[in-house]
């Protein structure tokens, strides 16, 4: 396996965890019934395995990977994913209060990425870890254009859907949830105000859109877009900002969203794949 395979596998992980994981699967994964937990995690791992196969099968067809190494690698990754997720589900079953613990969320994601990386390294003897320093020195010229686009896709999913889920968990974790009633919709804890019924997951969707605009602005060298996004968001929430509790929730969520999107935009800009508009 090579660096490009690793990138595709990480994209597959992000797609299965953040995009294709629906509420019914999550309800099973975090059910109070252990059989449902197993079934839910098996379904999730099947989706993860399918994404990995679809994204990397080309390397077998073109002869870059032998079928045996390919199958063993993906099966090991899927098994590792399943074990990590089952342990997480059982941990939350025993201590429900940690479901929105941000350290659990971050550790879970790091373990998945680490598992994928280790298996790629094990099955690719050509990878030389001693080249890490030269990699940093020559960045991004030592990365092929196609691989840069794959890295861009990883940053995009991480900064949009990934950060959106993190913000929801973080807001709950620091207990700024008293402004509204929280209702469990299965795939995540969302806010709902009985006096102001908005679209389902409206805040989550708006957050994704705002981060896309910021990523785009930073990538094309137009950071002024950030001011436009902040102004539009403040106007939309102007009346609610009088409530000190909501304003705290709003400011914390906005700062996390903007910081992550700006950092992601800087990385995208450094890849030099999108023309900068002066």
Image (cartoon, rainbow, N blue to C red):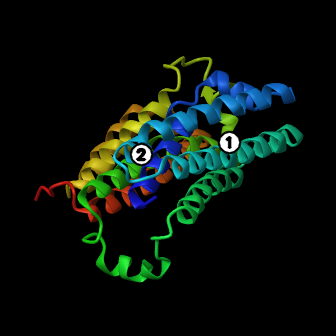
Task: Label 1: state its secondary structure.
Answer: helix
Q: Nearer the viewer, residue 61 or 74?
A: 61
Identified at 54% across, 61% down, the residue is: 123
User: Which labelled disc corresponds to residue 232?
Assistant: none
Q: Residues within 10 Å of mark 1 (few under 14, many from 20)?
A: many
Does residue 38 appear to the left or right of 258 in the view shown? right
Q: Is residue 185 visible?
A: no
Q: Which residue is mark 2?
A: 60
Is residue 222 positioned above or below 203 on the image?
below
Is residue 56 positioned above or below 193 on the image?
below
Q: Residues within 10 Å of mark 2 (few under 14, many from 20)?
A: some
Does residue 43 appear to the left or right of 269 in the view shown? right
Residue 32, by quadrant, is top right
Task: Label 2: state its secondary structure.
Answer: helix
Q: Are marks 2 and 1 in contact (CB under 8 Å)?
A: no
Identified at 57% across, 37% down, the residue is: 48
Depth check, mark 2 against mark 1: the one in front is 2
Q: Which residue is mark 1?
A: 172
> What x and y, as percent, mark residue 99?
75, 41
Identified at 34% across, 46% down, the residue is: 62
Q: Is residue 29 visible?
A: yes
Is residue 71 positioned above or below 179 on the image?
below
> What x and y, as percent, mark residue 209?
37, 37
Q: Nearer the viewer, residue 162 or 173?
A: 162
Q: Nearer the viewer, residue 36 or 66?
A: 66
Residue 61, by quadrant, is top left
Mark 2 or mark 1: whose residue is earlier in sequence: 2
* Label 2, label 1: how far apart the Cα atoms are: 44 Å
> What x and y, as percent, mark residue 84?
72, 48
Q: Nearer the viewer, residue 167 or 108?
A: 108
> What x and y, as percent, mark residue 154?
41, 50
Instruction: Say which quadrant the C terminus sits in.
Output: bottom left
């Amino acid at each position: 396996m090579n660096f490009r395979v690793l990138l595709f596998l990480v994209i597959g992980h992000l797609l299965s965890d953040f995009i294709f994981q629906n509420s019914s699967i999550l309800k099973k994964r975090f059910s109070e019934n252990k059989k449902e937990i197993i079934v839910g995690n098996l379904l999730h791992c099947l989706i993860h395995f399918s994404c990995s196969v679809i994204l990397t099968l080309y390397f077998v067809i073109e002869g870059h990977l032998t079928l045996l190494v390919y199958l063993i690698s993906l099966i090991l990754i899927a098994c590792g994913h399943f074990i990590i997720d089952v342990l997480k589900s059982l941990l939350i079953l025993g201590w429900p209060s940690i479901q929105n613990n941000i350290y659990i969320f971050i550790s879970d994601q790091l373990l998945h990425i680490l598992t994928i990386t280790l298996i790629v390294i094990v099955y690719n003897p050509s990878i030389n870890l001693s080249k890490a320093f030269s990699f940093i020195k020559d960045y991004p010229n030592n990365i092929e254009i196609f691989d840069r686009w794959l890295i861009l896709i990883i940053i995009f999913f991480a900064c949009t859907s990934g950060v959106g889920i993190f913000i929801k968990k973080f807001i709950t974790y620091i207990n700024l949830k008293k402004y509204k009633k929280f209702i469990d919709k299965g795939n995540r804890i969302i806010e709902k105000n009985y006096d102001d019924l908005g679209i389902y997951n409206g805040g989550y969707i708006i957050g994704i859109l705002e981060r896309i605009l910021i990523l785009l602005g930073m990538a094309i060298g137009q950071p002024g877009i950030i001011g436009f996004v902040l102004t539009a968001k403040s106007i939309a929430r102007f009346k609610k900002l009088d409530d000190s509790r909501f304003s705290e929730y709003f400011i914390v969520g906005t700062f996390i969203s903007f910081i992550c999107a700006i950092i992601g935009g800087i990385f995208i800009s450094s890849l030099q794949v999108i023309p900068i508009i002066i």
